[in-house]
């Protein structure tokens, strides 16, 4: 057998052993592979990892998966041990959008220190100015979130952290300052602006008008409201950072965003017009209030209040037909509103005053039935709400059947009473807290399921490890490796001999060896024939064949010699790899540290996750108790208001009945003298007859 055949069989045997050992070692040495991979990445990767991870988080953000974007930022922070100012600010924005106010505040506090370090490291005024602008946006957004949560002190602290404000953001800063220090004069700002300012913001003027109304400066308030009403207001376009930190809703298209901006501008004008009419009515200038509300938009979000004021103003200017229709429409369209309840009473009172007393009694009876029905509805709602176990399962609405992880969707049940109660910002925030807790509990439960699955994997690996160790003990691997090395050394020695002899036929293939064998047999036959026959021609042909074959072998010799040296080198590498994996397998088999650490870590994770689930359940229970208390307080308040309206309605009906009794009595008195005169004449007639 030639040297090439020996190399082929030896390589096949070695690959079989390599495959079996590598399969075993792969399942048991993930940690070694990971460490090796991390070492390689430390040596090979020279890219900006901060920028890479930041771009990955941006990808998730623009895909609408804000939670995954925040997870990506946290993972990059864990890997890199720190974040640059850009990624830190992005994390603060994501935390704000997720409602993590305390985490966002802590991030921004750290951002200040990080910003100072980067300012010292990078002597670039442009980067410093940009970072200061981003910090300003973050603090303004943080103040806005605190105000929306009712944490006024925290909002003041955030605003006090602002050192300077550019004209671009001064309007927003001015509005937040007005809200945080309400009702103090909004001109007493904490920070003076750097450049020229434009105070023509609709929100600034509106807040100023409200402050003037509270201080009874009605003339100045009327001027401000007229300015808001008569001007067109356009919402400024926001860049990426402003959109991130201002926590604005996402729109499906730019057209939808523009339409929403138009609606917001119209809503500001509607509110200013409503306040203007309210001032006129409070000053008993009912004709001006009537004129203002006569052109009020029907589809405005303030249509309910405007409709009530318009009906009241119509009564005062003696437009009774309009007032009756508006009051009747108002209490039927808004049966659960306190303004609607007042409209019902005013309607019954107007019918009693402007129409017949009998119609007034009928109207009061209708209103009384209306209030009794509302009381019955309120009692039914109270009983059903108290019997509910899960608050989010009570009166579920299709609009909130599924909550998004961003937490931007507000809880909106089917129950109208609960919808009215959720106008209270604190109660709405408590419901949002319950939704957020449920989402967190689902995520923790998912992690717990994965941890359980990991425990099963560890158990399977333990059993697999035992099987591998048992198989290794029954297999004489050391003797097999010794035989392989002996065979390798023999083949290497044979190869060196052939290379030293430089015999061209040493690396002949099967066909060439077959030709060499035939040539050798031919030479043997010629020797036996000797001079018995004339073999000169045959010898010449044999010499030509032998010469051609020798020339081919000589041509192929260098390449084939290099191939055999290469195969020997590959065998050496394979043996070294198998030896290293065998040593690694022995190390893993003799050490229980890796699996023990995994088991311990898994058990700790299970304890932590179960503890977290318990804490979430306890927190949810506490919030649920607060929600029930607030809803009960709302139900009691509504019950008191309904009872007062019912009592007032019955008193009004009693007055109408009293007026009817007086009218009947007066009519009876008027009819009494004529009745006595007729009786006297009748008596006289009878007396004369007799």
Image (cartoon, rainbow, N blue to C red):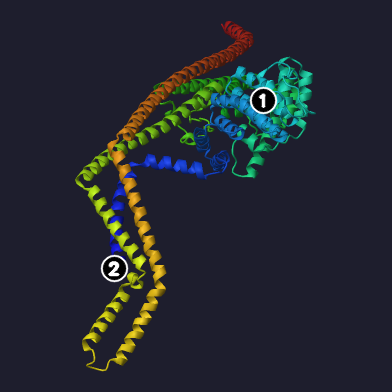
Q: How many marks?
A: 2
User: Residue drawn 46% across and 26% down?
Assistant: 434
Q: Position of residue 584 (x, y in %)?
A: 33, 42
Residue position for label 1: 311
Is there any visible trace of residue 297 in the rendered image?
A: no
Q: Position of residue 91 (x, y in %)?
A: 56, 32
Q: Where, quadrant-wise, is the N terminus in this rendering?
A: bottom left
Q: Is residue 650 above or below residue 513?
A: above
Q: Position of residue 264 (x, y in %)?
A: 67, 34
Q: Where, quadrant-wise, is the C terminus in this rendering?
A: top right
Residue position for label 2: 2
Q: Position of residue 635 (x, y in %)?
A: 49, 18
Picture quadrant of residue 232: top right
User: Residue drawn 62% across and 12% down?
Assistant: 671
Give the label on residue 285, or none: none
* Marked residue nearer the N-terminal end (1 or 2): 2
């Amino acid at each position: 057998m030639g040297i090439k055949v020996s190399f082929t069989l030896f390589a096949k045997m070695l690959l079989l052993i390599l495959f079996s050992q590598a399969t075993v070692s792969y399942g048991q040495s993930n940690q070694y592979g990971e460490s090796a991979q991390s070492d390689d990445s430390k040596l090979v990767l020279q890219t900006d990892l901060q920028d890479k991870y930041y771009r990955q988080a941006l990808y998730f953000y623009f895909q609408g998966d804000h939670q995954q974007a925040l997870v990506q930022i946290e993972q990059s922070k864990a890997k890199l041990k720190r974040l640059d100012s850009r990624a830190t600010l992005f994390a603060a924005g994501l935390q704000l959008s997720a409602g993590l106010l305390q985490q966002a505040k802590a991030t921004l506090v750290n951002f200040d220190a990080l910003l100072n370090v980067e300012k010292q490291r990078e002597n670039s005024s442009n980067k410093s100015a940009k970072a200061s602008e981003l910090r300003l946006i973050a603090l303004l957004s943080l103040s806005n979130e605190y105000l929306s949560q009712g944490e006024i002190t925290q909002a003041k602290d955030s605003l006090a952290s602002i050192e300077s404000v550019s004209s671009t953001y001064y309007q927003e800063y001015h509005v937040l300052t007005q809200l945080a220090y309400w009702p103090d004069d909004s001109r007493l700002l904490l920070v003076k602006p750097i450049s020229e300012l434009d105070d023509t913001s609709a929100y600034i003027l509106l807040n100023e008008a409200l402050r003037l109304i509270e201080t009874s400066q009605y003339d100045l308030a009327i001027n401000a409201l007229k300015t808001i009403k008569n001007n067109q207001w356009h919402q400024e376009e926001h860049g990426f950072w402003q959109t991130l930190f201002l926590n604005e809703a996402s729109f499906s298209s730019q057209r939808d965003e523009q339409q929403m901006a138009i609606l917001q501008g119209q809503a500001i004008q509607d509110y200013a017009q409503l306040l203007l009419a309210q001032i006129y009515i409070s000053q008993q200038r009912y004709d001006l209030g009537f004129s203002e509300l006569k052109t009020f938009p029907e589809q405005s979000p303030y249509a309910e209040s405007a409709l009530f004021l318009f009906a009241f103003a119509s009564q005062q200017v003696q437009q009774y037909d309009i007032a009756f229709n508006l009051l009747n429409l108002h209490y039927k369209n808004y049966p659960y509103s306190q303004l609607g309840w007042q409209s019902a009473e005013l309607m019954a009172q107007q019918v009693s005053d402007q129409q017949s007393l009998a119609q007034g009694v009928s109207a009061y009876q209708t209103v009384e039935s209306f209030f009794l029905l509302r009381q019955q509805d309120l009692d039914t709602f109270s009983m059903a709400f108290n019997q509910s176990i899960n608050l989010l399962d009570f009166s579920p609405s299709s609009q909130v059947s599924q909550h998004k992880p961003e937490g931007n969707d507000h809880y909106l049940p089917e129950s109208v009473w609960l919808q009215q109660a959720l106008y209270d910002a604190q109660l709405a925030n408590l419901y949002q807290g319950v939704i957020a807790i449920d989402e967190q509990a689902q995520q923790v439960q998912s992690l717990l399921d994965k941890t359980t699955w990991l425990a099963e994997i560890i158990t399977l690996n333990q059993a697999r490890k035992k099987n591998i160790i048992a198989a290794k003990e029954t297999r004489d691997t050391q003797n097999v490796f010794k035989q392989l090395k002996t065979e390798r050394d023999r083949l290497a020695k044979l190869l060196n001999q052939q290379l030293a002899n430089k015999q061209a036929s040493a690396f002949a293939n099967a066909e060439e060896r077959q030709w060499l064998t035939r040539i050798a047999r031919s030479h043997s036959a010629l020797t036996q024939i000797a001079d018995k026959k004339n073999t000169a021609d045959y010898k010449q042909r044999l010499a030509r064949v032998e010469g051609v074959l020798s020339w081919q072998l000589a041509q192929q010799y260098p390449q084939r010699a290099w191939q055999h040296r290469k195969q020997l080198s590959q065998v050496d590498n394979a043996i070294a790899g198998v030896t290293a994996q065998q040593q690694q397998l022995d190390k893993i088999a003799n050490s229980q540290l890796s699996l023990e650490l995994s088991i311990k870590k898994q058990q700790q994770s299970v304890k932590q996750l179960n503890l977290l689930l318990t804490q979430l359940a306890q927190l949810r229970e506490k919030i649920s108790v607060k929600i029930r208390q607030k809803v009960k307080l709302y139900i009691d308040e509504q019950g008191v208001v309904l009872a007062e309206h019912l009592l007032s309605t019955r008193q009004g009906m009693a007055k109408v009945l009293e007026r009817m009794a007086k009218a009947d009595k007066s009519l009876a008195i008027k009819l009494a003298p004529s009745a006595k005169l007729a009786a006297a004449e009748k008596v006289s007639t009878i007396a004369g007859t007799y």
